[in-house]
Every structure is written in C-alpha cells, then in structure tokens.
Amino acid sequence: MNDVDARMDRLRRAARYRYQQLVESEIERGSLDPDEVREERRLLKAADVAAHARAQIEEAERRGVFEGNPYHGKPLPGLDGQHDPDWWIKSKIEREDIRGIAPPALSLRTEDAELDGALDALSLESDVRDVLVDFNARVKEARRQLLGGPPVVTPMRDVESEVQAWQERRETRMASAARAAEQARLDARPRRWWRRRGS
C-alpha cells in the first residue's frame, strides 16, 4: 500500500469514527430512531464493501492480474439477471460434456441430432442396423415411461431408409476420396521441365 492509499484509508476511518460519534449523540438526544440508524449503518457497510472491492480490482488491474483473461472488461457469460441455484452444475455439465444424466427426452434429442455422424463412422451395414434398432428401442421405451419431465418428441428412424442413406453417403465419400487420391498422384508425378525439340 503506497502513501496515498494509506492516507485515504486513515481519512475514511476518521470520517467513519466521527460519523458514529455524531449519530450516537443524536440517538441519546432522541432525534434519531435506532432502527433507522441500524439500517443506515448497514447500507454504509455495504457501500464500504463495494468501495473496497472496486479498490482491490483497480489494484489488480495495475499489477496486470487480468491480462490475458478473455472476460476482462466484458460481462460474464450466463449472467442474465435471474438467479439460478443450479448454475454451477449446468455449467459443469456443459463444460465437461457430461452425458447420460439428462432426462431421456433431452438425451435422445441430442443423440438424434448426432446420429448421422455416428453412423458415418461405422464401416459395416450390420453395425449400422444394430445402432438404429437400439436407438428405436430406446425411443420406444422413453415414450412408454411416465416418469415426468419433458415429453419425448424424438422420432424413430426407419431402418431401411437410413441404411440406404448411409450407403449413399459412404459411396459419395469413397468417390471423393478416390478423386482426391488420383489428384494427389497426378500432382506428385514428376514433370519434365524441358522440351524435346523436333529435328
């Protein structure tokens, strides 16, 4: 703490002490209500806490503590003015991509959105069929259970049309991979940089 900060701190303490003496003398005379004084003291303490917090933040900024912080000078994400007691668990679930603890309606909706990508990672048609049959069975089971929570609106997948779409996507990927390999082979072929002149 430098000299200016120390001097300001002493002045604040002196002002608080003088204010308390004046208030106590007014209470003794009967011109102030003790309840009002308590409320005013509470508000002053809150103002002191806010001033102290601002001073700490300014000192940290001078030292460079916030450099590199992506939220420096910006509002924190997720603060919309409404208090949510479960904010910490929701942010942990989102941050660490935890799955399997959401209600079936939500987890099935997420899985449905990512199902085409998961199917494209498979190489056998029998595996694709097994995944689709399992997905449809879980959707059916979630619709039958009456455990509460949001309703299950995820549609079941038609196995035959999904397998056909998987095959078409696979053929398209294989054809583009073959074209890319052919282009790479042509690009890697040595080129003649001289020309043979005719006689």
Image (tube, grey):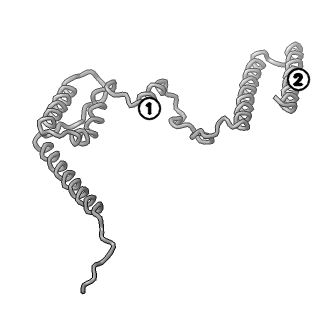
195, 54: nearer the viewer: 195
Cα separation, mark 1 vs mark 2, equals 48 Å
Q: Residue at x 16, y 37 (%)?
A: 128
Q: Please tell me whether mark 2 sits on a helix, a strand or a loop.
A: helix
Q: Quadrant of residue 184?
A: bottom left
Q: Earlier in the sequence, mark 1 or mark 2?
A: 2
Q: Quadrant of residue 131?
A: top left
Which residue position is annotated with label 1? Answer: 95
68, 40: nearer the viewer: 68
Q: Amino acid at mark 2?
A: Ala
Image side of residue 157 versus residue 26, left or right: left
Q: Please tell me whether mark 1 sits on a helix, a strand or a loop.
A: helix
Q: Residue at x 52, y 37 (%)?
A: 77
- Establish if 138 lies above or below 175: above
Image side of residue 149 versus residue 182, left or right: right
Classify the position of the C terminus by image quarter.
bottom left
* Residue 12 percent location from the top left of the image: 84, 26
Which residue position is annotated with label 2? Answer: 14
Disc 2 crowd rating (10 Å Cα; few below 14, some 14-19, many 20+) is few
Image side of residue 174 versus residue 113, left or right: left
* Residue 193 percent location from the top left of the image: 33, 72
* Residue 25 percent location from the top left of the image: 89, 16
Pick out the residue farthest to the top. Answer: 28
Marks 1 and 2: which is nearer the front?
Answer: 1
Q: Residue at x 85, y 30 (%)?
A: 8
